[in-house]
Amino acid sequence: MSQREWIEKDFYKELGVSSSASQDEIKKAYRKLARDLHPDANPGDAKAEERFKTVSEAHAVLSDPAKRKEYDDTRKLFAGGGYPRGGFTPGAGGGFSQDFNIGDIFGGANAGDGGLGDLLGGLFNRGGTRTASRPRRGADVETETTLGFREAAQGVTVPLRMTSPSPCTTCHGSGAKPGTSPRVCPNCNGTGIISRNQGAFGFSEPCDDCRGTGSIIDDPCVDCHGSGIQNRTRTITVRIPPGVSDGQRIRLAGQGEAGLRGAPSGDLFVSVHVSQDKVFGRNGDDLTLVLPVSYSELVLGTTVSVPTLEGRVGVKVPPGTADGRILRVRGRGVPKRGGGAGDLLVTVKVAVPQKLDDNAADALRRYAEAEKASGFDPRAGWAGA
Ligand SMILES: [Zn+2]
Ligand SMILES: [Zn+2]
């Protein structure tokens, strides 16, 4: 914190005390304000949170006699309002922690004072954590599913089994055996945080006794072993849109964990694996297919009935089609997100018979001679090679 900030901020005014207030008066004023303004007592109130920070900052300086003197001296020096030329340098004794010292609010000999129990009760009434009772958006959930090739291409409704943590039904999330309840951790007075001061620095760390939860369970619930959480399996039915591809992650808004206290649900993310198909392949929105044909079909031309995702389609192979050529059937591919569909790409591939009967073999020999006589040379392009 710079001296400029010190000059601009009236810490006494923030705490509502006079500049001659005793250390005790400062401490009392701070405790009262900190309780009223504590974020847990004012969920979602940004103004209160800002005030809480300011008040904590003021207390951090004024509660330390050495820092308070430095603060007083700095302000006295520039009380006339004129800032020194050349700007300000950070205070020589600077570097203290701006961490709010929560231990100072609840700790010390006055921990049992009236009102504190009520405050703690309000903070730790659910699950032993300070955030449990606030509205909170449900968690996002990740799961995966394997779809058949055609299911993925056309869209499908699938049941998804999901296991996720939810409050234990036996202890209603408290973690304590029914009939008993968690008690406030005496080590940290329920804050879950232990604060210690080392020189000018204030350190806060999670309390060891309660592992930062602020409460201690003497008699744990047998069903959740004191965690307050159980894994619950639920099955939901989700509609996977057409056209998903292998490895794709789909977001289903609002299908995740339920929100707490009316907050919106989280999202469900489904990683999709798509199994291979015997007949079809995919290239984006295009469906691919290898069509086995005979040599004579390529030479003479033909029309072949080919399977698609829905029914069959007649594909015309023009006379003189080269082996490996791709024939495109428009609109018979994978449905697109925005409507319409990709194409069906049919690759023709000659199937060579491994065995011919005498009749066919004789005909083929006669054909070969006739082909040569007609002047067809498959390696004509190699002339001179
Ligand atoms: Zn503790
Ligand atoms: Zn339980």
Image (cartoon, grey):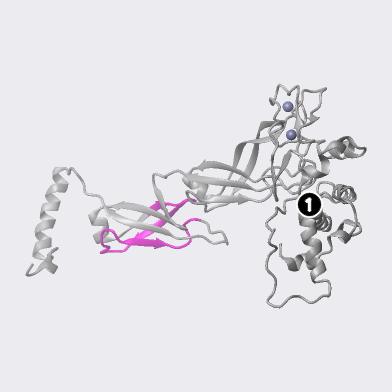
Q: Which residues are magenta?
A: 305-334
The three-letter amino acid code for the residue at tag 1 is: Asp
- Image quadrant for the C terminus? bottom left
Asked whether the viewer can see residue 8, the reply is no
Image x and y of residue 223, in percent = 70, 23
Mark 1, residues whose alpha carbon is within 10 Å: few (<14), some, or many (≥20)? few
Image x and y of residue 145, in percent = 54, 41
In depth, the one of 350 and 159 nearer the eye is: 159
* Residue 321 on the magenta segment: yes
Residue 112 to residue 304: above or below: above
In depth, the one of 49 and 77 nearer the eye is: 77
Image x and y of residue 154, in percent = 53, 50
In depth, the one of 74 and 55 nearer the eye is: 74
Instruction: Please state the quadrant of the image where ligand 1 appears.
Output: top right
- Image quadrant in which you'd find residue 318: bottom left
- Image quadrant for the N terminus? bottom right
* Residue 258 on the magenta segment: no
Image x and y of residue 243, in percent = 52, 53
The residue carrying mark 1 is 64
What residue is drawn where x is 27% and y is 56%? 297
